[in-house]
Amino acid sequence: MSLLKDKVALITGAGRGIGKAIAMRFASEGCDIAFTDIALNDVVMETEKELKAYGVRVKAYVSNAAVYDDAQQTVSAVLADFGHIDILVNNAGITRDGALKRMSEQDWDAVINVNLKSVFNFTKAIQPVMWRQGGGSVINMSSVVGVSGNADQCNYAASKAGIIGFTKSAAKEMGVRNIRHNAIAPGFIHTAMTDALPEQVRKAWENQIPLRRSGEPEDVANVALFLASDLSAYVTGQVIHCCGGMNC
């Protein structure tokens, strides 16, 4: 039996990477997929094509998750196209790494707006929808860096730590309507961003991980599937680490 049959998921920033892996995993379990990206380029359209191969309804939307009005308009458009939204995955994110002494206000604001404000934007937009439906699952993408911090990532760490506080607070507010809020804290995940690192840097990171390997986007997607499905019906306000033990 498909775990997400007849469900509709809205996933931000899902044209590639972890967001795409989550969308593919959900689609494989019968979930209809609405996903956003900053532009409908060839990569995003290819993702849409791959998702449709699962035989589910799929549509990509142009949306800047950091912009409040964009989030409102996107949720309205998804409702008009799909009729309901059962799952929200706040996945959109960027990095602008650098030492604090050299970090510009622009780099601070960009990361906070895309990573943290976007979670407020989309959760705020979807709250009345799930409230009327009497349930839903919101999954926020945090990071182990939001728990432990990391040099040269003060902006990123602050945004991801903020997501954790937001998640726990929203879970307490909305549990009365069976709306669950949880966060995932990925560790060192194999993506295009980590591929750009020198091999010796990647190896140094992997040697610090008890499982002695980087994670795959599919590892994070499997955790998201658990949180999206009824398997986690009594789980809310939690942060699940998907990091191979690097933060254990």
Image (tube, grey):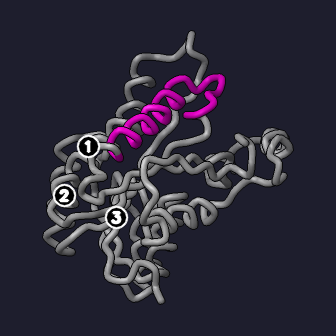
Point out the tag, 3 or 1, that comes first from the N-terminus: 3
Distance from label 2 to label 3 (Cα)?
13 Å
Point out the tag, 2 or 3, that comes first from the N-terminus: 3
Q: In the drawing, does residue 81 fall left or right of residue 106?
A: left
Which image quadrant: the C terminus? Answer: top right
What residue type is disc 3 on? Answer: Ile
Could you say which disc has been placed on residue 121 in the image?
1
In percent of width and height, residue 220 lies at: 58, 59
Residue 181 painted magenta: no
Residue 167 painted magenta: yes
In percent of width and height, residue 124 lies at: 22, 46
Do we see residue 107 in this rendering?
Answer: yes
Distance from label 2 to label 1 (Cα)?
16 Å
Do we see residue 43 in this rendering?
Answer: no
Please name the residue shown 51% across and 17% down the image: 103
**Residue linked to disc 2:** 131
What residue type is disc 1 on? Answer: Asn
Q: In the drawing, does residue 194 fall left or right of residue 103?
A: right
Q: Main secondary structure of the magenta part?
A: helix
Closer to us: 147 or 24: 147
Q: In the drawing, does residue 244 fall left or right of residue 177?
A: right
**Residue linked to disc 3:** 87
Q: Quick one: SS at disc 1?
A: helix
Nearer to us: label 2 or label 3: 2
Point out the tag, 2 or 1, that comes first from the N-terminus: 1
In percent of width and height, residue 5 lies at: 38, 83
Q: Which residues are magenta?
A: 146-171
Closer to us: 119 or 66: 119
- Name above or below for residue 81 compared with residue 36: below
Q: In the drawing, does residue 118 fall left or right of residue 1?
A: left
Cβ atoms at labels 3 and 1 below 8 Å apart:
no
User: Which quadrant of the view contains residue 12?
Assistant: bottom left
